[in-house]
Image: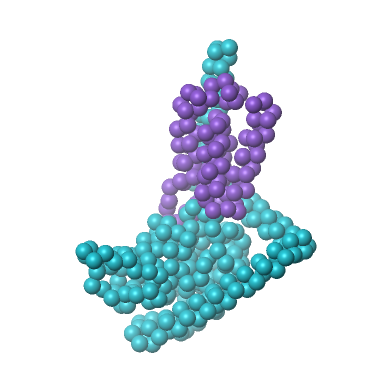
Chain colours: A cyan, B purple
């Protein structure tokens, strides 16, 4: 009996070894081919996402969960309203600061040519702070392009294009976990550290005056706004304080984004 | 656990993991991977990890394939534990 266990145990280990080698080979092939495999797998995942979303939508539309659906649509409407108000408030803040301090440096008033693209994947599933949009090289999207949300490209930068295929692009959130970006708050330069989920952190000297609601600009991204100060955590004895930043629009509610080229 | 039931559980966990990669926050597939790797010598956990990285890993900025690495760590890290406690109780095929 024990011999049989050992034999089977050895078989399991051999299978795991084979699986490990296969995974490494597949990753190597993907890297060597410049992400061709990734393109196919993403195509499959987008199809799964589309089918799943379609099933959920048609189930809700069938009236099967009508009372629940009514509640959910009310919640959605309130959320949209909240987002709109937050956006308005944040845009007013940004425009005021531009007018007062950065008028000569930042020209956000000029509208940039760009394209509107649908979000065709979950925006909360990626461990790397990425999501997929339904526009690619055929639409003029290129690696490094800025992904904005708001109105007609005047809004906030939420991501940058990381990879493109013919009709899709993978974008990485500005506040993706571990990301770093030079930003400016009240005219002072800092480097943010992304935390994922539309959150980031910076460390500022304790005497530096900053408060919740201040807008956060990114000089590297043509001085565009990337978020707001969400909270300030101060310890009386420390030389530095933590400032937590948040995205203006919750990425989980994104349906469409606006893509522009930073060179234009 | 019978051979067929064991296979059903493993296949279900695999599909659950794949669906979770696409639809849910990253900790959900991670839990599925841990559950599968803890109970079985589940080579399919490697596939879930690889699938997550192929879908979500960006080329730029360069990042380690964390889910693939996690799946390797889970599958091989739990091997001594499975050998010690589950020998002859479901992981023998």
Residue projecting furthest to the bottom? A99
* Image coords of residue A140 (percent x, y): 56, 68
Instruction: Give the answer, above or below, for where B69 lies relative to A46.
Output: above
Taking the spot 63% from the left edge, 73% from the top edge, the residue there is A77
Taking the spot 56% from the left edge, 70% from the top edge, the residue there is A257
Q: Which quarter of the image is occupied by the N terminus of chain B?
A: top right
Is A227 on the left or on the right of A2, as rendered? left
* Image coords of residue A110 (percent x, y): 47, 84
* Image coords of residue B3 (percent x, y): 67, 26
- As rendered, which of A168 and A216 lies closer to the eye? A216
**Can residue A172 be spotted in the picture?**
yes
Taking the spot 23% from the left edge, 72% from the top edge, the residue there is A207
Is B8 on the left or on the right of A237, as rendered? right
Instruction: Give the answer, above or below, for where A136 lies relative to A9.
Output: below
Q: Which quarter of the image is occupied by the C terminus of chain B?
A: top right
* Image coords of residue A104 (percent x, y): 35, 86
**Can residue A162 be spotted in the picture?**
no
Q: In which image quadrant can residue A75 be found? A: bottom right
Taking the spot 37% from the left edge, 66% from the top edge, the residue there is A244
Q: How many marks?
A: 0
């Amino acid at each position: 009996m024990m011999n049989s266990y050992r034999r089977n145990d050895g078989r399991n280990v051999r299978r795991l070894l084979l699986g490990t080698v296969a995974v490494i080979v597949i990753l190597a092939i993907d890297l060597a081919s410049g992400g061709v495999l990734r393109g196919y797998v993403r195509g499959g995942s987008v199809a799964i996402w589309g089918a799943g979303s379609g099933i959920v939508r048609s189930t809700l539309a069938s009236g099967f969960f009508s009372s629940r659906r009514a509640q959910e649509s009310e919640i959605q409407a309130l959320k949209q309203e909240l987002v709109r108000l937050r956006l308005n408030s944040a845009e007013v803040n940004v425009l005021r600061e531009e007018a007062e301090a950065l008028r000569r440096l930042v020209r956000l008033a000029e509208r940039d040519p760009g394209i509107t693209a649908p979000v065709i994947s979950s925006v909360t599933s990626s461990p790397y702070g990425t999501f997929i949009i339904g526009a690619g090289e055929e639409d003029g999207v290129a690696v490094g392009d800025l992904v904005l949300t708001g109105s007609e490209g005047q809004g906030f930068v939420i991501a940058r294009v990381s990879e493109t295929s013919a009709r899709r692009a993978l974008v990485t959130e500005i506040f993706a976990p571990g990301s770093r970006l030079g930003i400016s708050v009240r005219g002072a330069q800092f480097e943010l550290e992304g935390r994922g989920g539309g959150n980031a952190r910076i460390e500022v000297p304790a005497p530096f005056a900053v408060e919740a609601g201040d807008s956060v600009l990114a000089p590297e991204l043509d001085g565009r706004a990337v978020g707001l100060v969400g909270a300030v955590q101060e310890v009386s004895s420390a030389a530095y304080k933590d400032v937590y930043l948040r995205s203006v629009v919750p990425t989980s509610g994104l349906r469409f984004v606006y893509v522009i080229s930073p060179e234009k | 656990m019978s051979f067929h039931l064991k296979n059903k559980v493993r296949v279900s966990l695999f599909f659950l993991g794949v669906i979770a990669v696409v639809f849910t926050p990253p900790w959900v597939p991670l839990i599925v991977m841990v559950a599968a790797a803890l109970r079985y010598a589940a080579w399919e956990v490697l596939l879930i990890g690889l699938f997550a990285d192929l879908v979500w890993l960006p080329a730029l900025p360069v990042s380690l394939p964390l889910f693939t690495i996690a799946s390797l760590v889970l599958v091989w890290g739990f091997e001594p534990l499975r050998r010690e406690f589950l020998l002859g109780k479901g992981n023998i095929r």
